[in-house]
Amino acid sequence: MCGRYAITTPVGALAALFGFSDRINLEPRWNVAPTQTIPVVTADDAGRRLRRVRFGLLASFLRHRPVGPPVINARSETAWDKPMFRASLRQRRCLIPADGFYEWQGQGGDKQPYFIRARTGAPIAMAGLWDVWRDPAAPQDPAIESAAILTCPANDVLRPLHDRMPVILAPKDWSVWLDPHSPREVLEALCAPAPAGLLDAYPVSRRVGSVRNDDCALIAPLTPTQSGPAGRLL
């Protein structure tokens, strides 16, 4: 599961990297959590756009807002056939920029968080899908745009932490992912584990476990003494 991540790159740098012209004010976030507002990159006939959407998918066909945990991830192997995801996967794919994401190792209260990022330090693009939901019981209310992250089997870096990881798209594949006319078989081929050489993983403070904490110290590497026996570097 990918439920916490960081996005701190300034919007101007994101615009240059992802090719959108919007200049939405984005505050740096070191501890993005489900149901919060996140930036995503979409595409239409006018080009690429930056949107702010809810992290947790609300499918457009839902008659009522669901109760329970938000749907933040979709398994890329089965999403094409799931009613919750298939329409968005076919028509409304997006890129979810991130400077890195968190995963936990261990059991119970002794779990050690890790931060996973590109070895170059550059932002990554997680493959996402998005939708627009309107409450049938309150048609006057604003529509809610929302998104979820696609996942795939973990690569060698992530496997000691979790058996799943977000689908990370190479820049050369961004246009293909955003193109509504891309064939399914091409898109499915993109939903593969990222090369192990792309990523680093290192232990970080357990403070990331609380959504109230959102500061740059969350992604600072721990020393071996700080991280303890469960927090070995990978």
Image: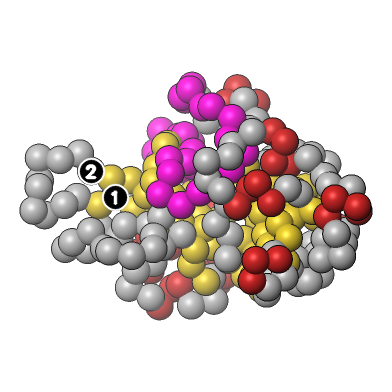
The residue under label 1 is 132
Q: Is residue 234 left or right of residue 148?
A: right
Magenta-drawn stretch contains 212: no
Rounded to the nearest angstrom, the CA distance separating label 2 from label 1 is 6 Å
The one nearer the camera, 81 or 63, is 63
Query: Where does residue 194 sit, x and y in percent of width and height?
Result: 73, 62
Q: Is residue 169 above or below residue 52?
A: below
Q: Relative to 132, does residue 66 appear above or below in the rendering?
A: below
Is 71 on the left-hand or right-hand side of 99?
left
Q: Residue furthest right?
A: 224
Callout 2 touching callout 1 (CB < 8 Å): yes
**SS at circle 1:** strand
Residue at x-position 23% and y-position 43%: 143
The picture places residue 161, in percent across and down from the top left corner, at 73, 68
Q: From the image, tell me which residue sits under label 2.
A: 143
Is residue 131 something one can see in this rendering?
yes
Q: Residue at x 43, y 44 (%)?
A: 36
> To which quarter of the image does residue 215 belong?
top right
Disc 2 packing (10 Å; few <14; some 14–19; many ≥20) = few
| Total count of labels | 2
Magenta stretch: give its range.
22-50
Judging depth in this view, the residue of 116 and 13 nearest the camera is: 116
